[in-house]
Image: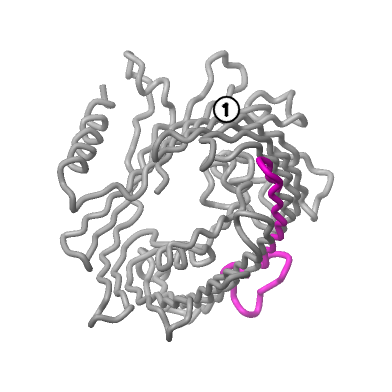
Amino acid sequence: MRSVPILCGLLLFCSALAWTHELSLSEASIDISATLAESSAVPEVYTRALLGGRFMPTAHFSISSTAVFFLPDTLRFFHADQSESEPGFVQFEGIVFQYDNIASSTLSLSAFAGTHDNPASPTLLERTYKIHVPEPEFSSKPAGSIFAGSQHIRGTGISVAGVPGNGPSVAAGYLYWNTRTEREARMNADGRYGFSGQLVQFNAFGGVSLRIHDADLRIRGGGVALLGDPERNSLYTEIGIRESTPKTAILERNMYLLFEPRVRLAAMDFALTFFSVPLSTDSPEFSGIDEQWIPEGNYLGLNLLLGIGNLDAHGKRGGISLLGSINPLDPGEITPFSFSISPFYTVRISDFLLEVAAILRPLHFDTPQYAGEFRASFKAVY
């Protein structure tokens, strides 16, 4: 079976992690989704596994790499009859060579290829100060992942990061080019700045992209802020402009907004998310939707998430997420993300989280492939 080489490779990689102290697992997750296709009694099962490793031969130098394994039709892949099965495949995500504490300073220099980071996320603060800034949970849930942000630093290039002055802040710059050639070749430059205080943490970014052969210039930028204590009541806000030319930066097509109050009451927590965002091209759901549901502008939406329990204190948490959205250009249009109900349950097992969730779409009960979906996710947390 084709699964044998993949499983053997994973076993050898995990064995190397156990015996080599310089090599560690930086990311690991497995996501399985099952839907009932129309006119079929057998569910379609899709599996995506992400695996990232870090090699540190010295205290200041590291090499990180990430790959994604896909099984588009999991049941057929493991079936004894392989004649009609769709093979699995591996996709390289990126590799980063990083050198820290240059000349005994806070500066670090990186060279990268592939997908490097999301400039709109607070990852720069988290890596530098180990400060966790929780992003909207609804966008990590199955029904809401289609509305997750799709700003990325992707290509081949270098970056420099450091701590300016003595304040609790961090800044970084990126210079890179895409993987295309000739007429589609582009040079890109981005800058980021993060700050962490007692009552606020924020991340701001801005960038330009230039196509060489015709001097086609594009811009992007935005910011994320968390006000309050993440462990108590807080307010998360996000604003940005997608990559666009200065002359065509139409707000309803290129600007996205998100506003999320978060409230914690003993063992319960609430999050009410208001958003105006485009569909995310990086979401697995994006490839399976009809083109007629992809508008030129944003979707307006509201998500209510209720959680009960605490993963850190009790090792388990359950809840429900209610999502509704409309296309402002066609408010009466019914899409798979017009309305959904998603119950979920998460348990912590050592350094791993196991989450099971379902997606129910009442407006699509007459269409089996959109009416419901089951998800299972298993990922490492550090």
Q: Main secondary structure of the magenta part?
A: strand
Q: From which residue to which does the magenta span run?
A: 241-270
Amino acid of disc 1: Phe
Residue at the far bottom in the pictured view: 165
The vertical placement of 278 against 253, above or below, is: above
Image quadrant for the N terminus?
top left
Which residue corresponds to mark 1?
374
In what element is the residue under mark 1?
A: strand
The vertical placement of 19 against 195, above or below, is: above
Q: Position of residue 101 (x, y in %)?
A: 27, 75
Q: Is residue 317 left or right of 300 when viewed as pictured?
A: left
Q: Observer-nearest residue: 153 or 15? A: 15
Q: Position of residue 341 (x, y in %)?
A: 71, 34
Q: Residue at x 57, y 73 (%)?
A: 221
Does the stretch in magenta take in 326? Answer: no
In the figure, residue 381 lies in which quadrant?
top left
